[in-house]
Structure formats: C-alpha cells, structure tokens
Image (cartoon, helix red, strand yellow):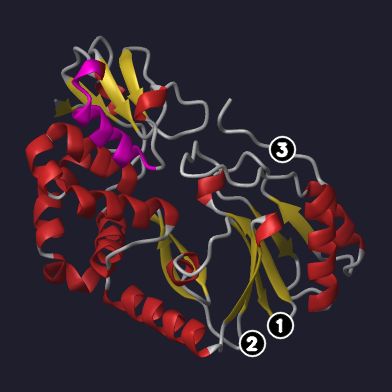
C-alpha cells in the first residue's frame, strides 16, 4: 500500500489506521471508540492491529492506499506497517513499543520512548501532512536513535530524575485497585518541565512515563502540596482489550462540590468523560484551600458511587 493524505482520498479505496473512516474506506484498523475493526484483529494499539492484519490474509482487502486523519506515534507506526510490511515486521516489537510510548506513556525499551519523543519534536503539523517526511526517516530513527539525541536528551533526563525519585520514595505512589486509581504525591517546589504526550507538549513536575511504568491504575491523582490534578489515562478512552479499565465517570458534579469549598475566584473544571485524556483541575487559583486528606476522601467517595459515563466498546 502507499500512503495518501486523508484529504486526498476521495474516490480511492483505502484502509484507515488509528483514526476515523473516510467515505471511501473499505477497512478500519483502529482502537478508537466505536471503531468497526474486525473483532479478530482487535488489540490495545492500532499498530498491533495493523500487524494482526498483516498476519491474517483472510482479512486483506482490495485497497491501494492507507491513511490516517491525524499524526501521532501510533498512527505513524501503523501506516509504516502497511506501507513497508517487510521493514516493519523485521522491527515489529520495537515498532509496537514506540506506538506504546506515544499513546500510553509506557515502554519496554528506553529507546522506544526516545524515538517517540523525537517523532513528537519532528512532527510536521497536526493534520497528517508530516507523514511522508516521517515515514522516510522512520527506519533510520528506529535503527539509530542515538543520532537524534538532541531531540530527546532533555526529556530523557527528566524521566531519569522521576524514576530515581520514585525508587527512593521522594515521590510516593499509593494505588487503590478497586477504583483503578493511583495517587502520586510530588514534593512541593518541584518545577514543571516539558514532556510529550502523543505529539503535543505539556508541562509536568514528574514525567508521566515513569509513573505509568510503575502503576497498574488508569486513573491518577497528582498531589503537590495543595495542588491537585486528577486525570484519566488515554487507555480508558479507547477499545482497550488486554483488560477493560474501570469505566470513566462524569466528575462535573464533584467539580461543583469542590468549587463551593474554594474562594470565589477559584473554579474546578472537568474536561468531560468523552475527552481523550480528561482532567479535573483548578482554574483561577494556584492551589486549593482543601487539605490533601480531605481532597482524597472526597474524590474516593465520589468515585465509589458515580455511575459509568463512557463506553468505548459500544
């Protein structure tokens, strides 16, 4: 297959990976919510689904083009699998691990995270226009990540620092398995540093990959003094098949309850149960007036009784 930009697919039978179908799509290979990917091909990552497709000739379709409606690591590696099956299959475990580092913030091999960050730093826009350039350089990046060290060295140092802090107990993590929740407590005064999620950058005091590689939970509460942020991981938005994460709940009512306890200028907001990786966060103030034990108690009490508000499998 050849890559064709999403906006140029009209009239071309195509396979879509890691995204939404085009009107001319004949097969979708995606873990996105509600995706019509054949059940027999479903996996946690779209890259894994693409390889499953290569493994199963009975599901092959007559299509000359593969595309995606956005650019990220899982999408790029999925396109790579279908446009260069031989090269991708020879690097299969590594290709999947890069997709995992990009989408889930977890990895088996450290170089996979470095490659994922490099892709993020080299991404040529968000609409997919960077695919040709990144596909051309991907084999070299996979084989020689050290040659791209200027694109990952600072973030790698942040990851190492967070891993060391977790190992020493300076950053503590407590999990509540029945709630699929991990509580991460970060020392006050730690400065935020740039990290990559998918192909976007955000600022975090601890590197999410160090946390995600340590825990089993798919919901997290970060605490730094009286500063709190609750977040659902991306795995809870997609058709994750290794296990079914505890369903997301709508935290808007809890946001209202928390806001009532804050000064008038402060407001708690929830991004919505259908957002890709939604967070519950405070606007209008740097820190909450609610002390850490009370905040955790309110959150746990709410999570225990709130009904499910998101189902990516339907």
**Residue 109 x %, y %:** 27, 65
Compare marks 1 and 2 and give the one earlier in the sequence.
2
**Where does residue 128 sit, x and y in percent of width and height?**
30, 38
The image quadrant where one finds the N terminus is: top left
The residue carrying pointer 3 sits among few (fewer than 14), some (14 to 19) or many (20 or more) residues within 10 Å by Cα, namely: few
Task: Tell me, yes or no, whether the two marked residues, 3 and 1, touch with CB atoms within 8 Å.
Answer: no
Residue 309 - label = 3
Disc 3 versus disc 1: distance between alpha carbons?
30 Å
Give residue 164's mark: none
Query: Is residue 73 positioned above or below 53 on the image?
Result: below
Q: Is residue 47 magenta?
A: yes
Q: Please name the residue shown 50% across and 70% down the image.
A: 211
Depth check, mark 3 against mark 1: the one in front is: 3
Distance between the alpha carbons at the discs numbered 3 and 2: 33 Å
Q: Is residue 193 left or right of residue 272?
A: left
* Measured Cα–Cα span from mark 1 to mark 2: 6 Å
**Quadrant of the image occupied by residue 17:** top left
Whichever of callouts 3 and 1 sits on the residue coming sooner in the sequence is 1
On the image, numbered disc 2 is attached to which residue? 188
| Range of magenta residues | 45-58
- Marks 1/2 in contact by CB < 8 Å: the verdict is yes
Foreground tag (3 vs 2)? 3
Q: Which residue is mark 1?
A: 225
Q: Is residue 116 visible?
A: yes
**Rendered-image quadrant of the C terminus:** top right
């Amino acid at each position: 297959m050849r890559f064709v930009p999403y906006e140029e697919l009209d009239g071309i039978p195509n396979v879509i990976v890691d995204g939404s179908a085009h009107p001319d799509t004949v097969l979708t290979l995606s873990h996105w919510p509600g995706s019509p990917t054949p059940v027999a091909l479903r996996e946690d990552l779209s890259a894994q689904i693409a390889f499953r497709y290569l493994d199963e000739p009975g599901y092959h379709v007559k299509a000359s083009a593969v595309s995606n409606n956005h650019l990220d690591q899982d999408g790029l590696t999925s396109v790579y699998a279908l446009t260069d099956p031989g090269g991708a299959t020879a690097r299969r475990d590594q290709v999947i691990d890069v997709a995992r580092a990009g989408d889930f913030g977890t990895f088996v091999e450290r170089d996979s995270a470095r490659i994922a960050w490099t892709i993020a730093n080299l991404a040529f826009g968000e609409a997919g226009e960077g695919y040709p350039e990144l596909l051309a350089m991907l084999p070299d990046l996979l084989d020689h990540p050290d040659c791209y060290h200027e694109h990952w060295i600072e973030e790698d140092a942040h990851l190492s620092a967070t891993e060391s802090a977790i190992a020493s107990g300076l950053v503590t993590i407590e999990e509540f398995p029945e709630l699929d929740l991990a509580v991460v407590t970060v020392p006050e005064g730690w400065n935020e540093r740039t990290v990559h999620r998918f192909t976007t950058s955000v600022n975090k005091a601890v590197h999410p990959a160090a946390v995600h590689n340590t825990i089993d939970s798919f919901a997290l509460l970060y605490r730094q003094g009286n500063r709190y942020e609750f977040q659902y991981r991306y795995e809870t938005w997609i058709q994750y098949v290794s296990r079914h994460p505890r369903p997301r709940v709508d935290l808007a009512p809890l946001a209202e309850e928390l806001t009532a306890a804050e000064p008038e200028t402060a407001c708690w907001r929830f991004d919505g149960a259908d957002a890709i990786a939604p967070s519950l966060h405070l606007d209008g103030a740097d820190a909450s007036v609610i002390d850490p034990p009370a905040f955790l108690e309110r959150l746990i009490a709410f999570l225990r009784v709130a009904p499910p508000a998101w189902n990516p499998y339907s």
